[in-house]
Structures are given as structure tokens and as C-alpha cells.
Amino acid sequence: MKLFQTIAALALAVALTTTTCAAQESRYSAFRAHNADMMAVQPSWMGPLIQSDSRLSQSVRISVANFNQPGAQVLSYGNNHGVTLITERRLQFEFDPPAFFRNHSAALKDGFGNAAVQVKYRIASGNAEHGNYAVTAILAHDFAPRAYQNDLLSSVYGPRIAAGKAFGRFNVQTTLGGFLPTAKVTEQGRAIEWNLTGQVHPNDKLWLDVENNAAFIKGSSFDGKTQNFMTPAAFYMLKRRDWGPTHSVAVLGAGMQIATSSFHFYNHNLITEVRVLF
């Protein structure tokens, strides 16, 4: 009798374990399928290095920036990027942990920047068979800064509209938005930010693009000034030979922000990053 009870208990445990694993695998597969689902309703271009992508995607982004600013050579470990998750067919949530800034200067202290979150809402889009375009509303929020911060004096909101259109292996992407501090506006000012990217996709693994990044400042001691950068960049996708839409891929990216305006807060910003889309 005891042997029968033991066998029955073991069988029940195995059944429960199998059911639990199957349920977990099912949830995990559904979670992993988010990017594949988006392929059916969105274009297939690469997200730019600087500006926001008008598509929804699910990824981890590891980025390092190395730039010059007056009196310092600054390294940003994290570069204000993090994890993006597709939470619903039209919604994407992003969390960017604080970047660590290494200033290489006796006058500036090293330390962490601010955490940020971002929400995207896909307004309309179509894949290559249905217009090859995307239009998305974005709201970003940088939290109040810590002791050593990347030049922010308060929390900041960043509303944007992002759009893009592909023409075969070429696409154009753009964003228009604002830099809206929640406090100390007199010291920080506000800004209108506009980005434009032209991108070409010569083969199934390589993307080349050039971005124009502009900020038009209103208020503060920099009232009326414009900061503008040109950013050439390249991306290379690493994927398994038998890759399918539900498989993860890694993307290696690099580019340099080069100031084209006489006024700029920094220059020669070399950005290297790894993206894992899952």
C-alpha cells in the first residue's frame, strides 16, 4: 500500500511539474513571440543610434559613449539605454537605469546619472506589403537627478512623435519633440528637438545610416542657440543559420556624433553598443 502511495505521489509530482513547465514554456514562448508579431505589422529597418525608433521592439541595449566636453573626456557607461518590453500590441515600455559617468578630469566628479522611463504607443504602421511605414507617439521621463548628473537640474519630460517610411532597401525616419523640465526652467531652458535619419540596407545583415540631430533652445543663458550634430553609423546583425522570427538576434552598432554647429555642449561622441532582440 505504501509503495502504491509513493508511486502515486511521484506520478502526481511529475504530472504537476510537467504541467507547470509546459505552462511556463507557453508563457515564455508567447513573451518571446512579441517581436515576431510586430514583424507582421511594421517595417523591418534598424532602429537609429541616437533618435527614437518609430517601431515597437523588445530588447536589451548595452551602450557606451565616449565624448569631449569643455575640460573633460567623458565616458558614459550605459548611455541612457536599457530594457524595452512590448506589453501590448500597441504599447512598449522602456526602463533605462542610471548611466555611470567617468569624467577623466580633476574638476569634475565621477558618478551616476538619472534613471528614465519611456512609453511608446504605435498609432499606425504597415509592413512591406502594407505601406512600409510607422507612426508612433512617445513620452519619456527622466527622473530627478542624483548628486552627480548629466547636466540636468530637475526631472524632465520628453514628448515626441516619431515616423518613418521605407522604400525598398532605403528608409527615412524622423522624430519631433521637446525637452520640458519640471523645475528650474530659468536655468535649464526648454528645447525643441528634431532628428532625421536616412538609412540603407545593402544586405540581410548590414545597415548604414546618417542621422541629423538638432536642438533649438528657448530660455536660459543659451536662449536662441541651436545645437546640431551629424551622426554616421553602422549596424551588423548576428543571427543563427536557421534563424526564425521568434529567435533572438544580436546587433553590433557604432557611430560618432560630430557637431556641425558652432554652439554645442559636447563633440566627437563615439558610441558603441550591443542590442539583443528577444
Image (spheres, grey):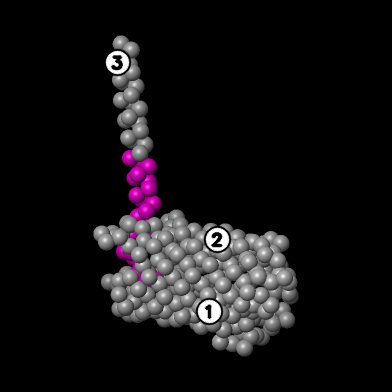
Picture layout, residue 258 above or below residue 20:
below
Q: Which residue is mark 3?
A: 4
Counting residues from the N terminus, which is met first, the one under dot 2 or under dot 3?
Answer: 3
User: Magenta stretch: dominant SS?
Assistant: helix
Between the residue at mark 2 and the residue at mark 3, the CA separation in whole angstroms equals 55 Å
Q: Which residue is mark 2?
A: 96
Left or right: 130 as drawn, with respect to 198: left
Which residue range is magenta in the image?
A: 22-46
- The amino acid beneath tag 2 is Asp
Q: Between tags 2 and 1, which lies in front?
A: 1
Counting residues from the N terminus, which is met first, the one under dot 2 or under dot 1?
Answer: 2
Left or right: 4 as drawn, with respect to 60: left
Helix, strand or loop status at disc 1: strand
Closer to the camera in the image, 17 or 109: 109
Helix, strand or loop status at disc 2: strand
Determine the residue positioned at 70% across, 74% down: 188
Q: Residue furthest top?
A: 1
Where is residue 130, by image quadrant? bottom left
